[in-house]
Image (cartoon, rainbow, N blue to C red):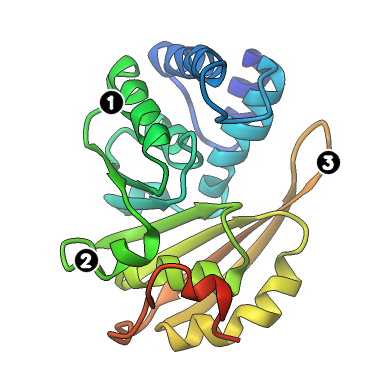
Amino acid sequence: MNEQQFKTMLEEKGIVLSPWQMEQFQIYFQTLVEWNEKMNLTAITEQEEVYLKHFYDSISAAFYFDFNSVESICDVGAGAGFPSIPLKICFPHLSVSIVDSLNKRISFLHHLADVLKLDSVHFYHSRAEDFGQNPLHREKYDLVTARAVARMSVLSELCIPLVKVNGHFVAMKAASAQEELNVGKKAITTLGGQLEKVESMNLPFENSERNIITVKKIKSTGKKYPRKAGTPNKSPIE
């Protein structure tokens, strides 16, 4: 996917990028490749692949969820900033918080936000389990996102506690989504969520399957969740 295809295919979905937004994506790509030589941020470094598998793929959440309807989003385990930084470029009004357990990735994201001239972005070096018990962040976000972080039964415990009641959790998954959901339904319900919809699409050019899972938070999460760091992964709610 070259830059023009990226721009055109987003326009077809109603997302129109200005010259500055297109420049931001170009700066993002260059910064990612440059820093990737010093630390392992991504295995994908070819420009056309980055635009397809990182940028377009991240923005695909907005094909199925209205990002103009929310103000605060939290991205759990964002790594090199996916999906929240591409979404922030497309929807500049968003206030974005990113949580990652690796401090060197947080350093990269701080630098990235500076070179992209982004405002209202906040980075937190923390385990998601600890972050979800922090009263400054617990049940404070309109939307919580995660892309390829953990299976749904685990991911729900890391993300749903951060969502406001009546807010949403959007998980971006590859082909195993339905299988993960079958196992993860109990966790979603236990944590106060309700499955709203699952949308499937194929990534252009390579036709690999993507699934966008939207969960609505219908009641407050019990105080015991999330459990201490490492526990959700070792013994998920199933």
Point out the frontmost of discs 3 and 2.
2
The part of the image, by quadrant, that contains residue 51 is top right
Task: Give x and y (percent) for residue 216.
Answer: 43, 73
Q: Secondary structure at mark 2?
A: loop
Q: Badge 1 is on which residue? A: 118
Q: Amino acid at mark 1?
A: Leu
Measure the alpha-carbon separation of dots 3 and 2. Answer: 40 Å
SS under mark 3: loop
Going from N to C along the chain, the mark reached first, 3 or 2, is 2
State the image coordinates of residue 121 (x, y, percent, origin top left). Answer: 26, 37
The residue that appears at 43% across and 41% down in the rendered structure is 84
Left/right placement of residue 48 relative to residue 117 reads right
Q: Tag count in the figure?
A: 3
Taking the image as shown, residue 166 lies to the left or right of residue 234, namely: left
Image quadrant in which the N terminus is located: top right
In the picture of the structure, the residue carrying the numbered disc 3 is: 207
Tell me, for residue 161, which label it has, or none.
none
- Which residue was labeled with disc 2? 134
Mark 3, other Cα within 10 Å: few <14 / some 14–19 / many ≥20:
few
